[in-house]
Image: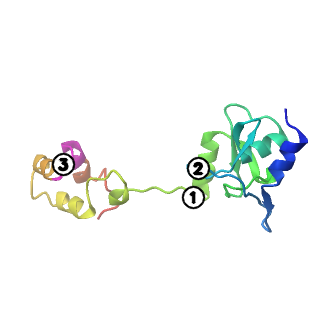
Amino acid sequence: MLCKADIDRFFSYVEKSPTGCWLWSGLRPSSGRYGQFSVEGEPISAHRFSWQWHKGAIPADMQVCHSCDVPSCVNPDHLFLGTALDNMTDCISKGRAVYVHGERHGHSKLTETMVRDIRTLRLSQKEFSELYGVSKSAVCAIVKGRKWQHVT
């Protein structure tokens, strides 16, 4: 059960910006982008707490999303409920989705130079596979243009 002290403590961490965002100045764990608050020792994301305090319960299958795209914002007028798909669609439609591919991807074993070399077909797919330490199917996908499409 919330008490006035919880609400007062919550708002002591809120800084209202000229943009209309209510910026969370309290705890923001290094593992996440969202502010964290606690009620009776139980942690809750600050924006989720704000939604619950101002607008009510959050259905189990819903996320509290930011229309302002500011993760530290707790203004209930900048928050909306949506599914994970709604949240991702919003992210993509606003150009916030970042897709890392090619040699910039952390698990890439190949460079763009290696990919260009594979596409010359100087060696067999098996030989390239052994030379670069990747599967023969990966080499085949590069040769057929199904992978590393951004490399010309």
In depth, the one of 10 and 151 nearer the eye is: 10
Task: Report how far apart the C-alphas of labels 1 and 3 lie in the structure.
Answer: 34 Å
Side of 138 relative to 149 (left or right): left
Residue in view at x 34 percent, y 57 percent:
102
Q: Which residue is mark 2?
A: 32
Rendering quarter of residue 100: bottom left
Most foreground residue, 115 or 131: 131
> Is residue 134 depicted above or below 70 in this figure?
above
Residue that label 1 marks: 96
Is residue 18 positioned above or below 85 on the image? below
Quick one: 129 or 145, which is closer to the camera?
Answer: 129
Q: Is residue 132 left or right of residue 15?
A: left
Q: State left or right for residue 103 relative to residue 127.
A: right
Instruction: Give the residue type at disc 3.
Output: Gly
Which element carries disc 2, helix, strand or loop? loop
Label 3, residues with CA under 10 Å away: few <14, some 14-19, many ≥20: few
Q: Earlier in the sequence, mark 1 or mark 3?
A: 1
* Nearer to us in this view, 27 or 120: 27
Callout 2 amino acid: Gly
Residue stretch in magenta: 132-140
User: Which of the two labelled residues, at mark 2 and mark 1, occupies the earlier sequence position?
Assistant: 2
> How far is mark 2 from mark 3, CA to CA?
35 Å
